[in-house]
Amino acid sequence: KHKLPYPSFDHLTVDIDLNTFSVALAALRGGYRPRSLTVEFNRNFAWSDPAYAVPDLPDEMWVQQDVCENGCKSAKKLPEIGDCYFSASPRAWLNMVKSFGYHFIAADNSGLNLFFVHESAAGQQPLLTLEDGKRVFTGGRNHGHLHGPCSRHIWLKLADDTDFAAASFVLNDQPLVMLMTKPGGDLHMQPIFHEGNVPAVLRARLLRPAGKELSAAAMQQILVMKPSPQPPAMVVSEACSETGWLLVLMMAVCFVAGGQAHRIGHAMQRLWPIRQKHLPGP
């Protein structure tokens, strides 16, 4: 459509939040080989975390609600509020692009993007590892927390030896895990991920008849994600907002009424001795 040179061109950047990983993978599996590649990664994962990625969810989008003074009323038009459910862990990215001949060369200071170069421009010798990235770009630490809550999301768990370029590979057929979090890590509010211990009864419901793990494609059929006209969080916040205003109004009325009663009481105290002087005796 846009007459993009095929298969090679200078540079490609993929930064679309939720589906960044699946779109970049589709471009590379489609045969495109930009000489350099920049992708958005999920910095909530530690450099050493396993390869986790968001399933391919083409009908969904990630939305970040900005914090503003008027309560962000426009957010009522959005399907859901963005959180830290987007893209993939650093290990997932390095493993994926390696299947297509890319080498890791840099990460930005903000902890938002990873940079790669193709072997056609840099040779076949690997350049940087995950350990190098942690040592060079974050001073031996992990990144801090970014965006909203991270716990209780479904992620793909991608084996380190996965061949993403194989003709038989299907992203949404990879094993699924539910990741939970606890606070901790190198920086304030950095989540530490661990795979949730799903009860046996629920785990049995998520298994195929053949005993294999439920794929992301099958999960999409079960968990139909439809945009709601208004996020539940907004309903709660608006209700609290309306209740708050009513409470403030009632307090103001009580304050004014109390002030008036106080003044009337003082006036009555001043008038009472005068009235006693003029009252007739027994």
Image (cartoon, rainbow, N blue to C red):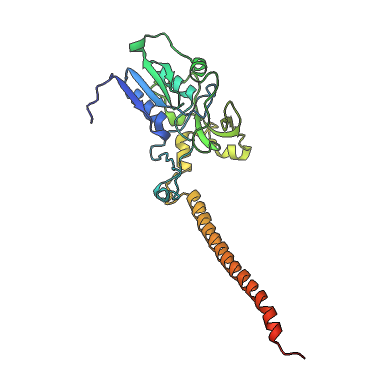
Q: Say which residue appears at 44% left-offset and 30% top-offset.
A: 87
Quick check: 188 above or below 160?
below
Question: Residue lying farthest right?
Answer: 282
Quarter of the image for residue 60 reads top left
Q: Toward the viewer: 127 or 257?
A: 257
Residue 31 picture location, percent across and down: 31, 21
- Is 232 situated left or right of 200 in this image? left
- Is 29 situated left or right of 65 in this image? left
Q: Toward the viewer: 151 or 203?
A: 151
- Is 123 situated left or right of 183 in this image? left
Residue 23 picture location, percent across and down: 37, 30
Quarter of the image for residue 61 reads top left
Which quadrant is the C terminus positioned in? bottom right
Q: Say which residue appears at 49% left-offset and 50% top-offset.
A: 232
Quarter of the image for residue 98 reads top left
Which quadrant is the N terminus positioned in? top left
Is residue 100 among what the camera can see?
A: no
Residue 157 picture location, percent across and down: 51, 28
